[in-house]
Image: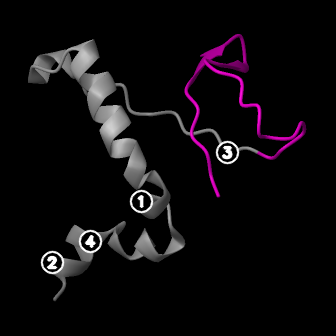
Amino acid sequence: MSKNIEGIFRDGKIELLEVPNDIPEDTHVIVTFPDRGYDLQEHGIDEAQAAGLRARLGTFIEDWESHDMAIYDNYDAVKSKL
């Protein structure tokens, strides 16, 4: 099972915003840098609302990251060819 933890990239290193207590040392990780082009405030979403959304949507993370969901990764491109 995967686990998402936010962090900050600084001086060539990732600083985690929380330290997981259930992950063994030397565990392999994959780092994804999100696109910074999406401004939530520009869409009327403040920090408290964003935190609430993140908490409510977090229950779906295991399903979203499931291998079976990869079929939807290029949904629009595949649909346009039908």
Point out the frontmost of discs 2 and 3. 3
Task: Identify which amino acid the numbered label 4 is placed on.
Answer: Tyr
Label ID, residue 80: 2
Callout 4: SS: helix
Which of pointers 4 and 3 lies earlier in the amino acid sequence?
3
Q: Quadrant of the N terminus?
A: bottom right
The Cα atoms of the two marked residues, 1 and 4, are separated by 14 Å
Image quadrant for the C terminus? bottom left
Q: Position of residue 17 (x, y in %)?
A: 60, 18
* Count of numbered circles in the view: 4
Kindly report which numbered mark, 1 or 4, lies closer to the viewer in this rendering: 1
Crowdedness near tag 2: few (<14), some (14–19) or many (≥20) residues, C-alpha within 10 Å: few
- Earlier sequence position, callout 2 versus callout 3: 3
Counting residues from the start of the chain, the first of labels 1 and 2 encountered is: 1
Determine the image quadrant of residue 47.
top left
Kind of residue at badge 3? Ile
Mark 3 and mark 1: span between their CA atoms? 16 Å
Q: Give the residue pinned by disc 1.
A: 64
Query: Secondary structure beneath disc 2?
Result: helix
**59 over 46 or under it: above or below:** below
Rendered view: 50 above or below 71: above
- Residue range in magenta is 1-28
The residue beneath circle 4 is: 75
**What secondary structure do most residues of the magenta stretch adopt?**
loop
Q: Earlier in the sequence, mark 2 or mark 4?
A: 4
Three-letter amino acid code at disc 1? Trp
Q: Nearer the viewer, residue 69 or 21?
A: 21
Looking at the rendering, which quadrant does residue 78 occupy? Answer: bottom left
Q: Are marks 4 and 3 in contact (CB under 8 Å)?
A: no
